[in-house]
C-alpha cells in the first residue's frame, strides 16, 4: 500500500507547495534535488511543520506532513477532512482569517503567530510562521500553505 506522500496527486501537490514557496519568497522551502518522488518524501519527512488547505468556502486541510500529523494528533484521514479553521480556537479565528486574507492579497506573510489546538485539545503556540498562496501549473491559486 502506498503511504500518503507516494500517491501521484500528493506528489504533484508537494511540487506545487515547493514551487509556490520559492515563487513568493525567492528561496526554496527545503534544499532538495531529485525526482518528484524524492521531493514528496523529503517534504513529508521534513523536520518542520508543513500544512495546506484548498480553496473551498470553508477550506479543508488537504496536506499535512508527518510532523504536522503528529503535532495535531491526527491520522491522515482525520486531518484531511478537517476544516482548517478548526485548528485555531474559536476566539482566535477572526485574527487567523485576517492574516490569511493578508497572505492572499500579498502572496505570502512571514509573521503569522497564534495559538492552535490539536484534535485532543492540546494548545500550542506558533511563532513567525510563513503562509503562502499555492499556485497550480497555470499560475492559478489552488490553496494556501503554512510552515513553521
Image: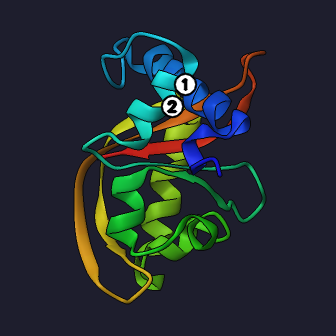
Q: Residue furthest bottom?
A: 121
Is disc 2 surrounded by few (<14), some (14 to 19) or many (20+) residues within 10 Å? many
Distance Cα–Cα, label 2 vs label 1: 5 Å
Left or right of 121, for residue 108: right
SS class of the residue under badge 1?
helix
- Vertical placement of 114 versus 49: above or below? below
Q: Residue furthest front?
A: 1
- Vertical placement of 130 versus 113: above or below? above
SS class of the residue under badge 2?
helix
- Vertical placement of 18 versus 84: above or below? above
Q: What residue is shown at x 47% (from left), y 72% (from top)?
A: 87
- Vertical placement of 80 versus 37: above or below? below
Q: Are marks 2 and 1 in contact (CB under 8 Å)?
A: yes
Q: What residue is shown at x 31% (from left), y 39% (from top)?
A: 46
Please name the colour scheme applied to the rendered image. rainbow
Front residue (pair 15, 103): 15
Give x and y (percent) for residue 56.
77, 56
Is disc 1 surrounded by few (<14), some (14 to 19) or many (20+) residues within 10 Å? some
Give x and y (percent) for residue 85.
56, 70
- Per the image, the residue denoted by label 2 is 40
- Per the image, the residue denoted by label 1 is 37
Figure label count: 2
Q: What residue is shown at x 38% (from left), y 11% (from top)?
A: 26
Q: What residue is shown at x 63% (from left), y 63% (from top)?
A: 80
Amino acid at each position: 500500500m502506498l503511504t500518503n506522500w507516494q500517491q501521484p496527486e500528493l506528489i504533484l501537490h508537494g511540487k506545487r507547495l515547493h514551487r509556490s514557496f520559492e515563487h513568493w519568497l525567492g528561496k526554496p522551502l527545503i534544499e532538495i534535488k531529485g525526482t518528484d518522488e524524492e521531493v514528496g518524501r523529503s517534504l513529508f519527512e521534513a523536520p518542520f511543520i508543513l500544512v495546506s488547505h484548498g480553496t473551498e468556502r470553508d477550506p479543508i486541510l488537504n496536506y499535512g506532513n508527518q510532523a504536522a500529523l503528529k503535532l495535531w494528533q491526527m491520522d491522515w484521514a482525520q486531518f484531511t477532512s478537517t476544516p482548517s479553521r478548526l485548528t485555531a480556537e474559536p476566539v482566535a479565528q477572526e485574527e487567523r482569517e485576517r492574516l490569511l486574507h493578508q497572505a492572499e492579497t500579498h502572496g505570502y506573510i512571514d509573521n503569522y503567530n497564534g495559538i492552535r489546538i490539536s484534535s485532543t485539545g492540546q494548545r500550542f503556540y506558533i511563532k513567525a510562521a510563513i503562509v503562502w498562496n499555492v499556485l497550480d501549473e497555470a499560475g492559478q491559486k489552488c490553496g494556501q500553505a503554512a510552515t513553521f
